[in-house]
Image (cartoon, helix red, strand yellow):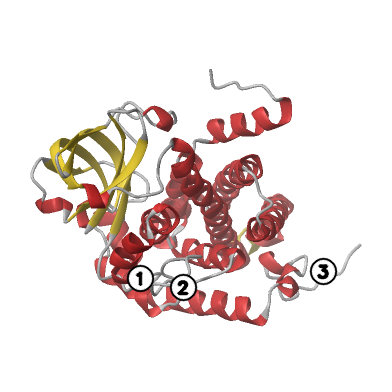
Amino acid sequence: MGDSHPHSPTDPLDFLRLDSRLTPEQRALRDQVRRWTEARVLPAINDYWERAEFPREIALALRELPIIGGILQGNGCAGLDMLELGLVVQELARADGSITTFYAVHSGLAMGSIGLLGSPQQQQRWLPHMARLEKIGAFGLTEPEQGSDAAHVQTRAHRDGDTYRLNGAKRWIGNAAIADLLIIWARDENGRFGGFVVEDPTHTPGLHIQNLSGKVTKRAVLNAHITLTDVRVPLTNRLEHAQSFRDVARVLARGRYVVAWEALGAAAAAYEIALRYAQTRQQFGKPLAAFQLTQRKLVEMATELNLMQLLCLHLAELMQSGEANDAMIAMTKYNNAAKARTIISLAREIMGGNGLLIDHHIARLWTDAEAMYTYEGTNEINLLIIGRELTGLNAFV
């Protein structure tokens, strides 16, 4: 028989003493973001989520943290290392998925496209304003009929004098309705894939943005359906180094890396909420946490959390050294998105009916996990990327 006396619970994300692998600077940044989310996000986010309203004031307050621009260097960007970026996303996701998506779209996909594929002049033109959150960015790749098959977008760009004319449609575009810069991905008349920066999109003739309604996930961030009818973009607004889908795929790979950390953060939050609930909720004369079935769920959750974290930490090292490939990133995203779904569902089970109430945060995390499972490549697409690497055979076609 073991000791029946209660003792202080162990931090689930330090069960294997992984905190010791972080530098003091990395721990300080992580803790700074955690304190910020606890003060700024958690007290207010449920009301915004329930109203399906974007928390603009909270989102813009991200400028209080040294994180905008992620790993980009110069032009006012944060210049984080890969592990710092992951820890930032982990902490944002522990609080809320909608704020995490706002950050990932603006700082990662939009700024990342300009930082990775723009000319030095384009970077200097746009990135300083974006780093100060004076201009918000959006990333328009997914289309109504082209989701997972993003390489075959139907949006077209035709050169007309000193401008391009864009025609097509985009869907599920985060931040579009509040964006000052909207990057539209399209093929030109020569079949080349390119990124075209539309400035002030809400006042651009021929560009119509309609926010999607009825979402059951990420309700506090705006996603839009966009139609483009002869939208004119100056030649100078085409990202100079974006020539093929392989170029935008480099941006998407970083996005998958971010989602792996987001899934870890959301799952950690769900575990912590469920653990606190199980320790205090009394049933049949004792706390839920004292029941064997509950402890089994908590052990399964904590074990998977640590495995998810190990993957993230190792992938961060590979990304930082330039050794990571698409399949490694896909495997981490595939694993973590699936495991987050399971962990958060178990947390909901532990909380019973109360887990269905948004007041306890679990219901928000529960539905947001479905988005993580779906975007930056559905888990089926990531599985096939891994399968191609393992077998040498392409199952996409």
Circle on res. 4: 3
- Amino acid type of the residue that numbered disc 3 sits on in the rendered structure: Ser
- Amino acid type of the residue that numbered disc 2 sits on in the rendered structure: Ala
Q: Which residue is mark 1?
A: 131
Q: Is residue 9 left or right of residue 33?
A: right
Q: Quadrant of the N terminus?
A: bottom right
Q: Which is nearer the eye, 144 or 266?
A: 144
Residue 234 position, x and y percent, is 19, 49
Element type at marker 2? Answer: loop
State which quadrant residue 277 falls in.
Answer: bottom right
Q: Which residue is mark 2?
A: 78
Q: Which is nearer the eye, 168 or 224?
A: 168
Element type at marker 3? Answer: loop
Q: Is residue 167 left or right of residue 283?
A: left
- Amino acid type of the residue that numbered disc 1 sits on in the rendered structure: Ala
Residue at the extreme top: 397
Q: Are marks 2 and 1 in contact (CB under 8 Å)?
A: yes
Q: Relative to 386, say whether 217 is above or below.
A: below
Distance from disc 3 to disc 2, alpha carbons, whole Å, reads: 48 Å
Element type at marker 1? Answer: helix
Task: Judge the density around disc 3: few (<14), some (14-19), many (≥20) Cα neighbours within 10 Å.
Answer: few
